[in-house]
Amino acid sequence: MDETPQLLPRDKLLRDNFTPAEAILFGVMLLLSLLVFWLGDPRSFWLLGCLLILGCLTPVILKTHEQTHPFFVDLLWPKFWMCTAPAWILTLQFIIGLTQNPLATIDIGKLTYHVLEPINTWRPTSAAETGTWLVLFGFSAAYILTTSLYIVPKSRSFFERLLPWLCFGSVLVAVFGFIQKGLGLAKPLFTRGTGSEDFFAFFPYDGHWAAFAILWCCACFAMALLSTRYEDNPTFIHSIGPWYLTGGTLLGVSGLIVDAPLPSAILLLTLSIMLLILAVHFLANSNDIHRKAISTSSGLAASIALALGFIRIFEDNAFPAESTDLRRAAWHLFQENPIFGWGFDSYGRLLPFYGSDTLFGQPAERATSDLLQFLAELGVFGCLIVLGFLIAFILHYTRRRHNIRLTNHLLIGCGAVLVLACVDTPFMSPSVFCSFFVIFFSALRWGELSRSKIDEVDAARPQLVTPESERRVPFFTKPYEEKEK
């Protein structure tokens, strides 16, 4: 990979060796992945509680970073508050909404009934239950923790060490899922199960697995392509690239045994895109002696994955009537309270008032579309906060650094999951939620580090001449003139 020519060996060691904050963040990210990869139950109180505890370590990481970072960190706290603003705003919206509960109870004889009372649409509302607090704070803490990946790492070496472990962990889960399917187990291990057979590994719903596999499939292919750009890299088949390629392909082909048609189709189409990128790379940008064989086989595999993906889209029951009714109910909820929505996790409680008669007696917590679910629960205000910040991050990257290939490859996975969120519920799963923001912020930070001077990435403004007293580690690039006394 290209190195800054003015950088001395001593400065490279300073840049690439972990600071105490980076070491803590590295360990916390591994622990986070261990939890979310192997505990797939979306509403596990153990998992949500652990996410809350890990999120509380964020101030410790950032304060350690402030005290031990060798370069300028003028933008540390402004960047932290900017990145975490959506979590604080949505939490505040939820707390204010507790002052207006649209549900009331009436007693008729010995029976208690819920009734829907008139509300002020210009104020937030909340129809949440007691357990909603843990869900909200657990997800918020996980998001706040993952923003550290956009703030703390000072070099790309951090991600070159972290992402291989996370890719390896995701592939292990895939292998476990294939073994589980082969053994014919009736439910995921360590979960209560859902009573149906649409599960994979530790994911009670295999649509969540498909979203998880999309993210880490793209990460594996991104790392495989990155390995081909190292200056000292051997031929591809003798490098670590084929291992990443095998892992990414294994994650992608798991879409063949995913029961949910649309998540399966998007996973297979994503695999096709990544294989096509690999084929084009070896055909146009590589001097590898096996480049024709690799590009031909990758192109053929991409065509097969593309065909299988379209078959899943157009197969029978890809758009079941029940899912359509659930989405229609979410749209009706949004129309009734469009500004602030009905409050986080309120869809399931209000569904009996707005759902179709065909859904009578069938409880459902999700609208089978995260987009419609967020519109119903958070309203236009909450959705603009979430989408606005995602768009702002992407625009900040594309305005100056749109040619960073690893970042682009990682963002393909994030984009595919956002498309899936229009027709399924990937962000209900803590595993998908955490994986999405780990990859998203890793991609953006990689882009920042790729085109910036190492000691000015987080500086408020570049300084042409900085007094030596203000540098924690002065850089001296001239020859030393030593004199014997």
Image (tube, grey):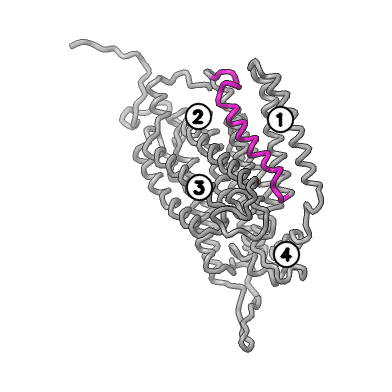
- Secondary structure beneath dot 4 equals helix
Q: Residue at x 70, y 62 (%)?
A: 330
> Quadrant of the rendered structure where residue 447 is?
top right
Residue type, label 2: Ser
Relative placement, left or right, of 362 versus 463 is right
Res. 229 visible in picture: yes
Residue type, label 4: Ala
Q: Nearer the viewer, residue 403 or 238?
A: 238
The label number, if any, that marks residue 437 in the structure image: none
Against 238, is 334 above or below? below
- Secondary structure beneath dot 1 equals helix
Q: Which residue is mark 3?
A: 82
Q: Which residue is mark 4?
A: 329
Relative placement, left or right, of 350 versus 303 is left
**Disc 2/disc 4 C-alpha distance (Å):** 48 Å
Q: Nearer the viewer, mark 4 or mark 1?
A: 1
Of labels 4 and 1, earlier in sequence is 1
Q: Position of residue 120 (x, y in %)?
A: 63, 71
Q: Position of residue 42 (x, y in %)?
A: 57, 56
> Quadrant of the rendered structure where residue 465 is?
top left
Q: Which residue is mark 1?
A: 276
Q: Residue furthest top?
A: 484
Q: Nearer the viewer, residue 258 or 435?
A: 258
Q: Which residue is mark 2?
A: 452
